[in-house]
């Protein structure tokens, strides 16, 4: 394990500049337990494993491979995402902690069996404190390579006894969160006739469109690529709109299923929907400011880490012995938790994202108290 430098070199327009980057200030802010830098000259591996909290169990979180512009960006992503995993596991009632890994590099050109296996050895060195899984830029095939070096990996192909692609379970959880939000906002959880705008017709977005269409919802969809949009239009009769139009559509529900940090001061002001309920992680650019803005507009915001937990529930089920039906039925409970969060948000007069964080932290703190009485 390499010591973390507090100076990060960043390349800009051909020149190299040095910027102060205080890693300990970052990990102290959100109370991370451990950060591991993994590097290997032979394979070109450069990775960061961030373990946020292991009070409830081993930290589980996917490995993201991305062409980060700077090392600071990569570390920030690992820190932010690992914290989100802690809350996601805690609020879902799983005996798991939160962690995340990022590999710096272009997944299209820099990935190899050797690199993934070397990364697997670093995961093995942590002795089960971190369990990895698939994420943006990694695939079930990569998990297969990692599994050659460590047993602390989930998200394996179904043929190898894994749960396969978690997206259908994730979409089901988002659908449950959306129905609960509709119940709170409109008095009924039926989505029949509701106008729903979906941002991102990728793996989760398309499964979600299928579920809401079956219930008779009217779908509007956008994406920056055509392949998913074509399926949405041909199969589910979705109306296709331009990416910049999606925020201000006159719809009942907005479902962000593309990237994170997409809700900011400017576009929240243009929202006409009564519910925001989607799969993307970290949708609010800033949890307090933008969560408060959404609440002040009377919009029901279903906390992202709560309603997109189906994928995590699916891989946890794999860890404890995979049964597909159990993963789906546990995911269904998201409906009740979302209703609890709306009540807590009203009672405590805080936005729903913070209400969900408080509920997750309560479970972790209760568990710490329980441990101290052994
Ligand atoms: P995906 O990559 O299959 O789909 C994302 C889609 O968003 C792509 O089609 C992409 O072209 C589109 N997109 C990107 N930028 C866009 C923009 N500016 N406007 C419109 N569309 C844009 O990913 P996915 O697996 O469907 O996941 C969607 C989101 O849900 C991600 O934020 C992911 O982190 C989160 N999530 C996914 C899972 C899962 O099980 N797959 C679990 C939890 C959270």
Image (spheres, rainbow, N blue to C red):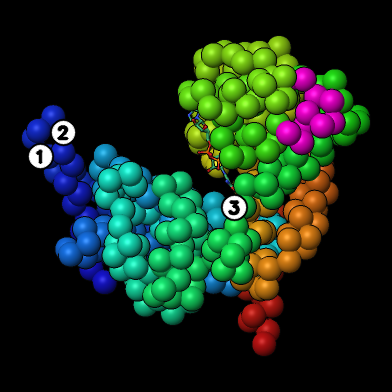
Instruction: Find residue 284 and report its image quarter.
Output: top right
Give the image quarter of residue 213: top right
Highlighted magenta segment, given as a residue range: 210-220
Q: Which badge, 3 or 2, comes first in the chain's sequence?
A: 2
Which residue is labeled 2 in the image?
Answer: 12
Q: Is residue 284 visible?
A: no
| Residue at horizontal 37 percent and vertical 54 percent from the top | 102
321 w.r.t. 134: above or below: below
Residue, far left: 15
Residue 166 place in picture, x, y as percent? 62, 52
| Residue beneath disc 3 | 165
Task: Reply yes or no: does residue 271 show up in magenta.
Answer: no
Of residue 33 and residue 108, the one placed in the foreground of this image is 108
Q: CA distance from mark 3 to mark 2?
A: 38 Å
* Mark 3 CB within 8 Å of ligand 1: yes
Image point (58%, 72%), residue name? 57
**Secondary structure state at the residue bearing disc 2:** strand
Badge 1, how many Cα within 10 Å: few under 14, some, many 20+? few
Name the disc covering residue 16, or none: 1
Q: Residue at x 16, y 46 (%)?
A: 9
Q: Are marks 2 and 1 in contact (CB under 8 Å)?
A: yes
Left or right of 141 in this view: 65:
left
Q: Position of residue 96 (x, y in %)?
A: 60, 67
């Amino acid at each position: 394990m390499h010591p973390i430098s507090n100076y990060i070199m960043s390349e800009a327009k051909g020149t190299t500049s040095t910027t102060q980057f205080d890693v300990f200030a970052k990990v102290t802010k959100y109370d991370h337990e451990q950060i591991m830098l993994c590097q290997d000259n032979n394979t070109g591996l450069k990775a960061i494993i961030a373990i946020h909290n292991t009070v409830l169990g081993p930290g589980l979180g996917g490995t993201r491979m991305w062409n980060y512009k700077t090392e600071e960006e990569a570390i920030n992503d690992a820190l932010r995402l690992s914290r989100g995993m802690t809350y996601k596991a805690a609020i879902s009632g799983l005996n798991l902690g939160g962690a995340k890994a990022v590999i710096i590099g272009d997944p299209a050109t820099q990935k190899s069996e050797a690199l993934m296996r070397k990364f697997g050895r670093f995961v093995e060195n942590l002795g089960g404190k971190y369990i990895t899984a698939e994420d943006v830029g990694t695939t079930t095939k990569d998990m297969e390579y990692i599994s050659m070096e460590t047993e602390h990996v989930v998200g394996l192909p179904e043929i190898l006894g894994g749960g396969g692609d978690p997206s259908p379970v994730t979409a089901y959880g988002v659908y449950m969160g959306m129905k609960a939000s509709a119940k709170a906002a409109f008095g009924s959880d039926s989505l029949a006739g509701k106008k729903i705008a979906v941002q991102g017709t990728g793996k989760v977005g398309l499964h979600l469109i299928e579920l809401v269409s079956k219930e008779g919802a009217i779908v509007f969809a956008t994406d920056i690529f055509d392949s998913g949009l074509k399926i949405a239009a041909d199969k589910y009769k979705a109306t296709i709109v331009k990416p910049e139009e999606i925020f201000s559509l006159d719809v009942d529900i907005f479902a962000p299923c593309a990237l994170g940090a997409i809700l900011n001061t400017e576009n929240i002001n243009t929202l006409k929907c009564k519910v925001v309920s989607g799969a993307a992680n970290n949708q609010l650019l800033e949890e307090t400011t933008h969560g408060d803005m959404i609440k002040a507009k009377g919009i029901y915001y279903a906390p992202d880490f709560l309603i997109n937990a189906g994928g995590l529930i699916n891989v946890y089920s794999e860890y404890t012995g995979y049964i597909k039906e159990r993963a789906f039925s546990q995911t269904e409970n998201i409906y009740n938790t979302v209703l609890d969060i709306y009540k807590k948000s009203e009672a405590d007069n805080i936005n729903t994202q913070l209400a969900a964080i408080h509920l997750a932290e309560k479970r972790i703190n209760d568990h710490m108290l329980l441990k101290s009485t052994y």
